[in-house]
Image (cartoon, rainbow, N blue to C red):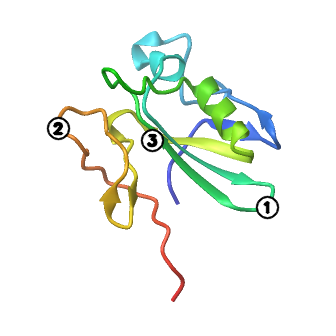
Amino acid sequence: MVSAAPTLVEDGRIHVDAATEGTVDPLDLSFGFAWANNRQPRTMAGIDRQGRLLLVTVDGRLSGGSEGFTLVEAARFMKSLGAVDALNLDGGGSSAMAVNGALVNRPSDATGERPVGDTIQVLPRR
């Protein structure tokens, strides 16, 4: 089990409603509503019509590099990859992806990969 929100794609349609899902409060901008509408590094998960898992990390805040995605841009991207259902995972400086033990993206923190308390791991069957 992992915490994730908001939904990006539902039943093949872009569906971003962070306010209804409780991840932003447009009436209380002190919470940081900008994280949803500003381009940020993002990590997303989705499923395509064949039931394949899509795990995607997009860098952001990089000078001369990736600017990241807003939530709506993230939803459009996941749909372009064929996702019929997708959701936003962690983002910002926590967005990191490793393949076979090697970091394959450029985290936005100046110090590099941020230590975090949760991960999603895809491991081979035994």
- The amino acid type, in three-letter code, at marker 1 is Gln
Please rate how many residues cluster around mark 2, counting C-alpha atoms within 10 Å: few if below 14, some from 14 to 19, many from 20. Answer: few
> At numbered mark 1, what does the secondary structure look like: helix, strand or loop?
loop
- The residue that mark 1 highlights is 50
Spatial CA span between label 1 and label 2: 39 Å
Q: Position of residue 72 (x, y in %)?
A: 63, 24
Give the amino acid at mark 2: Thr
The disc placed on residue 111 is 2
**Disc 3 to disc 1, how far (Cα)?**
25 Å
Residue at the (32%, 65%) spot, across then down: 101
Q: Which element type, helix, strand or loop, lies under badge 2? A: loop
- Residue 16 location (% of width, % of height): 68, 28
Residue corresponding to mark 3: 90
Q: Position of residue 96 (x, y in %)?
A: 37, 47
Give the farthest residue toward the front: 64
Residue plotted at (54% across, 30% down): 23
